[in-house]
Amino acid sequence: DGLRRGGGGGGGGGGGGRGRTWVVVGPLMVVLALGVGSEIAFGAWCYEYATARVGMPPTEAAYLTAVYWSSFTCGRLGAVPLAAALPPEGLLLPSLVLEVASALLVLCDPSSERVLWAATVGAGVGVCALYSNVMSLLAGHGLMSAPIVSAMQFACSLGHMTLPNLVALVMRHTSLGHESLFVVLAAANAACLVLVAAVSLHLRRRYKSAPPAALFDAGAKQV
């Protein structure tokens, strides 16, 4: 609470303070649901897309899936030093732009194998920092608590269960076919981008954040 701006002292005025907190937490729950759901949907469906839509041999499609998760891992490792220098939104916004751009790239040339490889790397790197930086964004503005962490985990689980199934429903009940995967991913990540930008602007106006290095040190101590 010491990071908060404005009147009334530590708790933010009871119910009103809780209401202002959930104005931030609610949109970020949607971001995690859509973002984590998109992460799992790509991992679940990229093999099917590669074999059925692009015509890759099964072995190459399996390598494509491995490249996606390898890009995710390498991106997360690469984001560690950046987290010490940039605020969470400084990593979230470019990552989400990369996610949207990767999905749109495939939609521009849905049958291209080269485009799919490039988009797979972009999607893996783009999603790697989502969860950790959403949590850092909350922590840096004094908005972390046990109920909020629980709510964030619930949002992740909800997205995990629903987005991959939504891709299947859109594929089955529309004429989009296998491109449904990237239509859903583009829409979901575009919504995340808008929500993160709006929340970041709100936090910048209403709260004082901790410096990135302080967040990094705090996280290191917890580990």
Image (tube, helix red, strand yellow):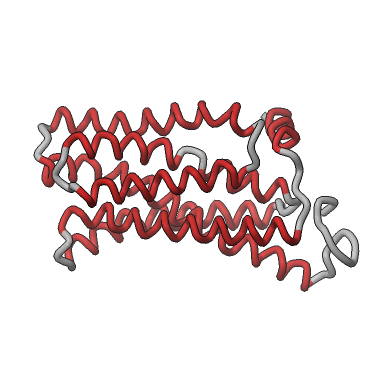
Residue 32 or residue 189, whichever sits in front: 189
Residue at (17%, 36%) from the top-left corner? 113
Query: Is residue 186 toward the left or the right of residue 147 in the image?
Result: left
Q: Is residue 198 above or below residue 94?
A: below
Asked where in the image residue 49 lies, by quadrant, the reply is: top left
Residue at (78%, 52%) from the top-left corner? 208
Residue 69 or residue 201, whichever sits in front: 201
Task: Give coordinates of residue 57: x percent, y percent.
Answer: 10, 32
Asked where in the image residue 167 lies, by quadrant, the reply is: bottom left
Query: Is residue 188 toward the left or the right of residue 20 in the image?
Result: left
Residue at (45%, 58%) from the top-left corner? 158
Task: Give coordinates of residue 77: x percent, y percent.
Answer: 51, 26
Query: Is residue 218 toward the left or the right of residue 183 in the image?
Result: right
Asked where in the image residue 169 lies, by quadrant, the reply is: bottom left
Q: Quadrant of the C terminus?
A: top right
Task: Give coordinates of residue 198: x percent, y percent.
Answer: 58, 61
Q: Residue furthest bottom?
A: 16
Query: Is residue 44 toward the left or the right of residue 127 in the image?
Result: left
Q: Quadrant of the N terminus?
A: bottom right
Task: Give coordinates of residue 132: x percent, y percent.
Answer: 57, 41
Residue at (44%, 51%) from the top-left corner? 35
